[in-house]
Image (cartoon, rainbow, N blue to C red):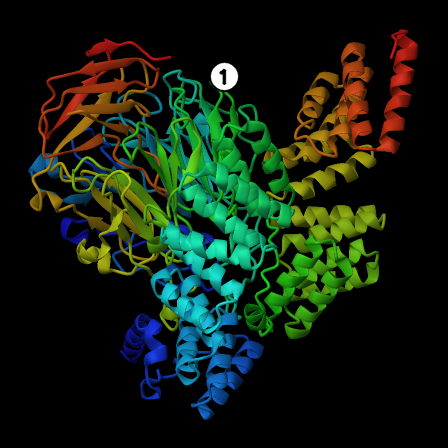
């Protein structure tokens, strides 16, 4: 019953959030009730410390606000909102607490209250662009296009390099069906931040609606190159909230992001930090097997493999990553065992079948390799590498027609690997005695490799083409 | 009011505290007239323990007696007794499969005039052939439609217009009990994993050979070219070329729009069609999906439910299969933002001629505000009224009755006129909870008219699955599709329902049969069920 009452209270105070600046301290909301029993020890300690400090400094806006920040960073949004409301009442002229409250409300989809709160934040500090953009986003979600467009335009005028502001302008204009001006805004956003995935996507859809199919496809291609790329927000206030997240999972996510950016050493360091916080975070160990493998640090990778299976032997990825590591170290027999273990845990693990096929193939067990490649394809029909390997092993067994059918499945999509696959297809046709198709695909591969500046591949293709043409007497 | 009418069913997850993902994802429900007696029967999908040796009574949520394992079939006695009452006929019918049940698809794959059942599982799937005498036979092996992966929604669709229903099966993730991962909430507590922790597994397309067997044409048809963690499926002609396409809601990944190339192959076109992502170009956790002509412009618009803090998508079709997400401007984004939506359907609950929306909600991760509750995933379901072209949808949840005040973990939802009163009712399948029967009382609140159309195909596809029915009335056109798919893990009444508003006069009813032929009928009376037989109408020249 007490819990229900506290929930009602929560809802009550949230509903009145926009008028806090006008309220007196006497109506300070109570601190939220927290049940921390199941939290991880580090997180629990951090929250308890902030909570106890806030309670012992009940009239201190900073203490309440800091508690809100800690709660927000761990996803306790409703509880964070209460703390921000306290802080706002205690320090009505502070942008920080008002902005945080507005952001928390917006993140929960309460755009009605968030709109009022964020307007208040902008009255306190009219130049804080992240607040302006959050407010504009909320207004757009509420279909208040006039107000939203005005804010995006102001943000763009105030900060002409802000790609987010132009992106927002594009979205409002799209909603208004003003597609030519929407495309202008999206294009500007992509010019300001070329890796802005969402803006490329939005621009692609706008071009499509304008009937500009070619440009739409080009924008989709750019979108697919970096789907999640977003411009820096410049939101120092929200960065301060994120910095409070000391959880192992957060560190690991950060490490994964660094890996995505190709920063392998930094990524490994972030994963190690995650393990300092929680040594039992098995996924961090698994990721480190791969990371240290790529960094050429076999012993460290092996160490994390041992740690991972000690904590939980049930993760297929542990064995898969270890298998890949062992292949790199040319410990093929051990690698085969690792891939078989992967499949034992997860019989749908396509890459493990593919790698197992490769190991069997190099032992000359073509028929067994073929079976594994087929299993890889069954579990991932768009597995290009598996189609390639299967095609190759079939051709090597002189099953040309079947092999060529598989290789034909590898020549799309068009990317940097395509010339290599087309080359393989051409070579397969050559071995099958189909000189006409062999020439066709080898020439196509040569063109692709040349266009991409793949010189080593190009010289291989030219050598084969030369040989083929010499035997047939056909001009190049 | 499920229990009052004999619908006693409580979903069992088999949870033992290991947070196996399938526990939180099921289950579905089917509404279909298995015995052709003129009323809708109900088939409910059940979970089980992951370890056969596990005693259900020693799980976290032990089933209350009298509990019977396996899926259950409830027969509706309405036609026989005049009273809405259900009786459990599972054993007699032979459809009590015991597996880790997920979903169900309904279709008459052998054109014998009786609906068959395809049951999806976390594990091997089952095809039940309806023998026409109140019993079913498991013909999975003979038909060749098993799939051992984690299957979710399935749909029957005659994608090649040969008169035989083919089968599309959405598969989800490569989760295995042995490979279960230890996932944590942001606070460090144990919680269900997100789909990102596993790899998606490919969907399956089984082509019906017409002799009771199927062939797996997934790769040959091009459907293996893109893989996603599929949950919801709906088949409709999205680009208006007369051939059924397939839309799949993927969880945490781009949705798939498989455009039918009219030669037995499909191409995935969701990205360029604008129906893959949110307006921000971000993948969302697609769960349930439905397609319907909510704006009366003659094409199929898509509504997709997503995860908490994402909001639902309303992809408005331009008639050529290009979509624009109008969820914000039509008032469906913010009200759906706080909830994780699953089962959903376009349906006209107040018979005003406009398609409204129901959403079955329930979280998949702990809800912080429910901390301390035994099962902290409950959320209320939602009802939205279509206010007409260009206007925002109006949320009716708070005035829709006590069923909407419940906060449960709803998943599947099936739609159909269960009491044959002309108003569409809903059966909601709750995860780790009781089934709910939401009987539509709107007929007592308004005097709107209605029409229920049962199709009878003469050249295969006996129930006209995929046919479109158009009602012309006082200058307006109402377009609906005969289907059992859409929603989440569930199967709807195949009869086509029309709300007619205050007018009883129907100027013309036009059916576009799945084979592309069009026929029209006039002198159709409102407020009744009519059976429309192929070949008995006036031939309408086809446009293509």
| Residue nearer the viewer, B68 or A110 | A110
Residue B501 visible within the image: yes
Q: Looking at the picture, how far across and down is residue B123, in whole percent? A: 48, 43
Q: Looking at the picture, how far across and down is residue B393, in whole percent? A: 27, 47
| Residue nearer the viewer, B88 or A200 | A200
Residue at 36%, 70% (x, y): give it: B373
Q: Looking at the picture, how far across and down is residue B443, in whole percent? A: 10, 42
Quarter-wise, where is residue A215 in the image? top right
Q: Looking at the picture, how far across and down is residue A135, in whole percent? A: 43, 61
The correct choice, above or below, for B526 with respect to A247 in the image is above
Residue B72 visible within the image: no
Quarter-wise, where is residue A252 in the image? bottom right
Count of numbered marks? 1
- The residue tagged with tag 1: helix, strand or loop? loop
Q: Chain of mark 1?
A: B
- The image quadrant where one finds the C terminus of chain A is top right
Hey, which residue is sitting farthest front in the picture?
A157
Q: Residues within 10 Å of mark 1 (few under 14, many from 20)?
A: few
Hey, which residue is sitting farthest top in the picture?
A473
Give the side of residue A423 with respect to residue A190, left or right: right
Residue at 70%, 38% (x, y): give it: A354
Residue at 33%, 75% (x, y): give it: A19
- The image quadrant where one finds the N terminus of chain A is bottom left
Give the side of residue A454 with respect to residue A10, left or right: right
Hey, which residue is sitting farthest bottom in the picture?
A56
Residue, disc 1: B263
The correct choice, above or below, for A254 with respect to A465 in the image is below
| Residue nearer the viewer, A409 or B520 | B520
């Amino acid at each position: 019953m007490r819990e229900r009452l506290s929930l009602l209270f929560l809802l009550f105070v949230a509903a009145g959030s926009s008028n806090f600046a006008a309220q007196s301290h006497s109506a300070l909301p109570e601190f939220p009730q927290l049940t921390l029993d199941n939290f991880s020890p580090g997180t629990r300690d951090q929250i308890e410390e902030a909570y106890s400090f806030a309670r012992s400094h009940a009239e201190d806006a900073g203490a309440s606000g800091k508690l809100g920040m800690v709660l927000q960073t761990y996803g306790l949004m409703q509880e964070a909102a209460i703390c921000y409301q306290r802080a706002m009442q205690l320090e009505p002229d502070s942008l920080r607490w008002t902005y945080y409250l507005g952001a928390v409300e917006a993140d929960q989809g309460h755009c009605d209250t968030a709109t009022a709160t964020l307007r208040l934040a902008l009255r306190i500090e009219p130049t804080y662009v992240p607040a302006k953009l959050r407010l504009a986003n909320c207004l757009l979600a509420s279909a208040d296009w006039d107000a939203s467009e005005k804010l995006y335009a102001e943000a763009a005028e105030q900060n002409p390099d802000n790609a987010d502001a132009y992106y927002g302008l594009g979205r409002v204009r799209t909603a208004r069906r003003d597609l030519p001006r929407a495309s202008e805004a999206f294009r500007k956003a992509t010019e300001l931040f070329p890796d802005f995935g969402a803006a490329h996507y939005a621009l692609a859809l706008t071009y499509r609606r304008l009937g500009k199919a070619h440009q739409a496809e080009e924008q989709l291609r750019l979108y697919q190159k970096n789907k999640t790329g977003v411009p820096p927000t410049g939101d120092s206030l929200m960065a301060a909230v994120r910095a409070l997240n000391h959880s192992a999972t957060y560190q690991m996510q950060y490490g994964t992001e660094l890996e995505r950016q190709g920063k392998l050493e930094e990524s490994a360091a972030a994963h190690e930090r995650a393990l300092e916080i929680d040594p039992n975070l098995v996924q961090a160990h698994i990721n480190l097997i791969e990371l240290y493998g790529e960094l050429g640090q076999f012993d460290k990778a092996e160490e994390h493999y041992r740690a991972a299976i000690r904590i939980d032997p049930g993760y297929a990825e542990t064995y898969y990553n270890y298998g890949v590591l062992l292949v790199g170290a040319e410990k093929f027999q051990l690698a085969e065992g690792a891939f078989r273990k992967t499949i034992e845990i997860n019989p749908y693990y396509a890459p493990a079948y593919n790698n197992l096929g490769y190991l069997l193939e190099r032992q000359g067990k073509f028929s067994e390799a073929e079976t594994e490649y087929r299993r890889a394809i069954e579990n991932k029909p768009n597995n290009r590498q598996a189609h390639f390997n299967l095609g190759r092993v079939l051709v090597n067994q002189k099953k040309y027609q079947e092999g060529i059918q598989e290789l034909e499945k590898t020549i799309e999509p068009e990317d940097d690997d395509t010339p290599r696959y087309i080359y393989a297809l051409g070579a397969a046709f050559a071995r099958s005695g189909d000189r006409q198709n062999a020439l066709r695909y080898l020439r196509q591969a040569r063109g692709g490799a040349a266009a991409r500046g793949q010189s080593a591949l190009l010289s291989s293709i030219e050598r084969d083409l030369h040989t083929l043409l010499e035997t047939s007497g056909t001009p190049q | 009011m499920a229990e009052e009418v004999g619908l006693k069913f409580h979903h069992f997850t088999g949870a033992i505290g290991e947070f196996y993902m399938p526990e939180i994802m099921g289950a579905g429900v089917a509404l279909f007239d298995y015995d052709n007696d003129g009323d809708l029967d109900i088939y409910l999908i059940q979970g089980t323990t992951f370890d056969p040796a596990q005693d259900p009574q020693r799980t976290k949520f032990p089933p209350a007696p009298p509990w019977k394992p396996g899926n259950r079939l409830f027969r509706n006695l309405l036609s026989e007794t005049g009273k809405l009452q259900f009786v459990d006929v599972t054993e007699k019918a032979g459809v009590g499969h015991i597996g880790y049940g997920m979903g169900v698809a309904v279709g008459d794959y052998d054109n014998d005039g009786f609906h068959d059942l395809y049951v999806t599982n976390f594990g091997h799937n089952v095809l039940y052939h309806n023998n026409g005498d109140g019993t079913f036979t498991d013909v999975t092996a003979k038909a060749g439609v098993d799939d051992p992966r984690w299957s979710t929604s399935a749909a029957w669709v005659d994608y090649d217009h040969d008169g035989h229903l083919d089968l599309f099966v959405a598969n989800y993730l490569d989760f295995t009990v042995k490979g279960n991962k230890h996932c944590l909430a942001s606070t460090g507590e144990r919680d269900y994993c997100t789909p990102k922790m596993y790899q998606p597994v490919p969907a399956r397309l089984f082509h019906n050979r017409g002799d009771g067997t199927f062939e797996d044409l997934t790769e040959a048809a091009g459907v293996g070219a893109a893989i996603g963690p599929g949950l919801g499926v709906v088949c409709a002609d999205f680009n208006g070329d007369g051939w059924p396409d397939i839309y799949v809601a993927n969880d945490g990944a781009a949705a798939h729009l498989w455009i039918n190339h009219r030669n037995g192959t499909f191409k995935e076109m969701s990205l360029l069609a604008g129906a893959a992502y949110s307006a921000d170009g971000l993948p969302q956790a697609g769960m349930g999906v439905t397609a319907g002509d909510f704006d009366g412009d003659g094409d199929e618009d898509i509504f997709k439910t997503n995860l908490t803090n994402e909001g639902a998508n309303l992809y408005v079709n331009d008639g050529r299969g290009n979509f624009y997400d109008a969820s914000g401007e039509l008032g469906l984004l913010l009200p759906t933002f706080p909830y994780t939506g699953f089962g959903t359907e376009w349906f006209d609950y107040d018979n005003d001629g406009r398609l409204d929306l129901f959403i079955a909600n329930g979280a998949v991760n702990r809800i912080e505000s429910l901390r301390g509750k035994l099962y902290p995933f409950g959320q209320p379901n939602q009802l939205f009224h279509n206010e007409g072209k260009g206007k925002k949808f109006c949320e009716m949840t708070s005035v829709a009755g006590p069923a909407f005040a419940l906060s449960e973990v709803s998943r599947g939802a099936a739609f159909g006129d269960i009491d044959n009163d002309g108003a569409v009712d809903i059966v909601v399948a709750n995860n780790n909870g009781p089934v709910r029967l939401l009987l539509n009382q709107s007929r007592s609140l308004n005097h709107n008219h209605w029409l229920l159309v049962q199709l009878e195909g003469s050249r295969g596809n006996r129930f006209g699955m995929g046919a479109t029915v158009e009602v012309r009335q006082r200058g307006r056109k109402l377009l609906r599709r005969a289907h059992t798919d859409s929603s989440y893990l569930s199967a709807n009444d195949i009869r086509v329902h029309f709300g007619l508003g205050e007018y009883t006069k129907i100027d013309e009813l036009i059916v576009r049969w799945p084979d592309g032929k069009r026929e029209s009928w006039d002198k159709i009376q409102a407020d009744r069920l009519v059976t429309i037989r192929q070949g008995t109408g006036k031939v309408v020249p086809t446009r293509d």
